[in-house]
């Protein structure tokens, strides 16, 4: 029976779902060994460092990841960077197939004046800052002004706005980074605007996220009723299902505005940013709107307008994605998830996406290479295996228990490796 070796680069949802699809295709005629390689000492990708901490239910998918990882013929090589510690060419030589599942970690730019000012940040920096990503601990996040602006009309923009607008003590029972909770408790921000270039009917929010907004206990959520009603008219008598459920959820918010709290989150539609104002730091944003230019004074601007994949030497990229045809890249290389299709869909979208690519991959396999083991190439490197990751995981969960949190995340690489006994 042929036994094939597959490397997966990236230990986020797309990587795990690719591994699961391979495991599901193992049978009497073929079997697979899977080596998952991750740059950070910790796996789970966006489930650990992207999902908003006040949405713990979404993180329960990590139980599925752990089940996949604890299956026979699966190995984790965390704290290993492809392109630095080991090359793509070496992987292609050692493995029957190499799957790129590195996601998209670089925030897209607006390309307007003032974007480089202090207080102008990308969600790609702000989100991992509050989620305890080791590379983003020291992000300069000025929270001393009373107003913040979030630019974007997707769930990431909404997560960012919510994190800025909720009462910070609501984060105490979550796994938000301690440094972020401390900073948010000292924050002066009381007004957060979310701005979208187009009308409500084009927003990329999902309706479950919108329906949760009125449940915020200490925050007013404001949408102008006339904006939503005009969007309903523009969407026509038979809008797509997602659009209809979004507009229904928005109308409920618009018809029942809260106004008793000191914290407010307000949506601005048909606002296109033209310039970020300020000399040494952000002081405001100029928007063009259907009624002319408008200036909003603020001290913090966070852009959440999409992501691009970070390049790896040896992997072809174009327009922020890996160049591919239905997931095939070149030679024995494949791609899944955001690196393949761009930052779209929810975590579950990666499951069907990965399954389709794995079917192609398996149909391409001929005879196994048997080209030795990756371990000999990494003898110089401190590698976090699945067993060692479980030690880190247990240490964080144990630290969270007395505080009523799911975990207390360690943010320094040295501390993470110490938990692993390295």
Image (spheres, helix red, strand yellow):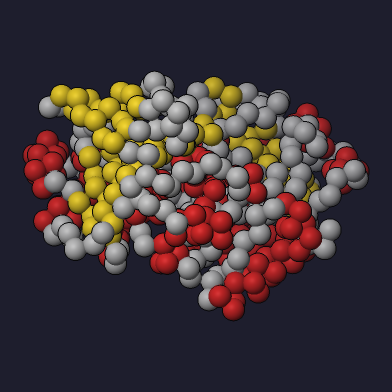
Left or right position of 353 against 421: left
Q: Quadrant of the C terminus?
A: bottom right
Hey, which quadrant is residue 186 in on the image? bottom left
**Observer-nearest residue: 201 or 152?**
152
**Observer-nearest residue: 87 or 146?**
146
The answer to whether residue 295 is seen in the rendering is: yes
**Does residue 26 sit above or below 195 in this rendering?**
below
**Does residue 281 sit above or below 246 in this rendering?**
above
**Observer-nearest residue: 32 or 101?**
101
* Residue plotted at (20% across, 29% down): 294
Left or right position of 192 against 350: left
Q: Position of residue 72 (x, y in %)?
A: 75, 62
Hey, which quadrant is residue 230 in on the image? top left
Q: Position of residue 52 (x, y in %)?
A: 45, 55
Left or right position of 181 against 214: right
* Residue plotted at (72% across, 51% down): 413
The answer to whether residue 232 is seen in the rendering is: no
Farthest residue, direction bottom: 402
* Residue plotted at (33% across, 47% down): 146
Q: Position of residue 326 (x, y in %)?
A: 52, 32
Number of numbered markers: 0
* Residue plotted at (29% across, 67% down): 217
**Observer-nearest residue: 3 or 387?**
387
Q: Position of residue 388 (x, y in %)?
A: 77, 62
**Does residue 87 sit above or below 58 in this rendering?**
above
Hey, which quadrant is residue 24 in on the image? bottom right
């Amino acid at each position: 029976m042929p036994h094939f070796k597959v490397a997966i680069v990236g230990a986020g949802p797309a990587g795990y779902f690719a591994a699961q699809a391979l495991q599901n295709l193992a049978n009497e005629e073929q079997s697979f060994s899977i080596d998952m390689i991750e740059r950070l000492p910790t796996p789970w990708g966006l489930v650990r460092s992207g999902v908003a901490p006040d949405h713990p239910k979404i993180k329960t998918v990590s139980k599925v990841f752990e089940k996949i990882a604890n299956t026979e013929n699966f190995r984790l090589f965390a704290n290993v960077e492809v392109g630095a510690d080991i090359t793509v060419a070496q992987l292609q030589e050692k493995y029957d197939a190499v799957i790129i599942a590195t996601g998209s970690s670089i925030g897209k730019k607006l390309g307007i004046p003032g974007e480089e000012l202090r207080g102008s940040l990308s969600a790609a920096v702000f989100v991992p800052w509050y989620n305890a990503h080791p590379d983003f601990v020291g992000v300069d996040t000025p929270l001393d002004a009373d107003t913040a602006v979030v630019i974007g009309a997707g769930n990431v923009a909404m997560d960012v706005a919510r994190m800025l607008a909720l009462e910070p003590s609501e984060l105490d029972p979550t796994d938000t980074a301690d440094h972020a909770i401390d900073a948010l408790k000292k924050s002066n921000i009381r007004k957060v605007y979310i701005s979208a270039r187009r009308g409500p009917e084009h927003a990329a929010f999902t309706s479950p996220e919108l329906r949760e907004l009125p449940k915020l206990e200490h925050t007013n959520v404001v949408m102008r009723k006339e904006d939503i009603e005009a969007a309903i008219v523009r969407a026509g008598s038979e809008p797509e299902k997602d659009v209809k459920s979004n507009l229904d959820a928005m109308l409920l918010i618009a018809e029942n505005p809260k106004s008793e709290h000191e914290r407010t989150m307000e949506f601005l539609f048909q606002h296109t940013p033209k310039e970020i104002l300020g000399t040494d730091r952000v002081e405001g944003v100029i928007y063009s709107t259907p009624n002319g230019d408008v200036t909003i004074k603020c001290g913090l601007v966070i852009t959440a307008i999409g992501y691009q994949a970070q390049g790896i030497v040896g992997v072809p990229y174009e327009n922020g994605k890996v160049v591919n045809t239905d997931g095939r890249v070149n030679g024995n290389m494949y791609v899944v998830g955001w690196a393949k299709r761009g930052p779209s869909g929810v975590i579950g979208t990666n499951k069907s996406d990965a399954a389709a690519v794995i079917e192609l991959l398996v149909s391409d396999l001929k005879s196994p290479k048997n080209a030795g083991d990756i371990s000999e190439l990494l003898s110089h490197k401190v590698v976090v295996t699945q067993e060692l990751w479980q030690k880190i995981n247990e240490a964080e969960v144990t630290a969270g228990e007395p505080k009523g949190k799911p975990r207390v995340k360690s943010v320094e690489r040295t501390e993470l490796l110490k938990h692993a006994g390295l």
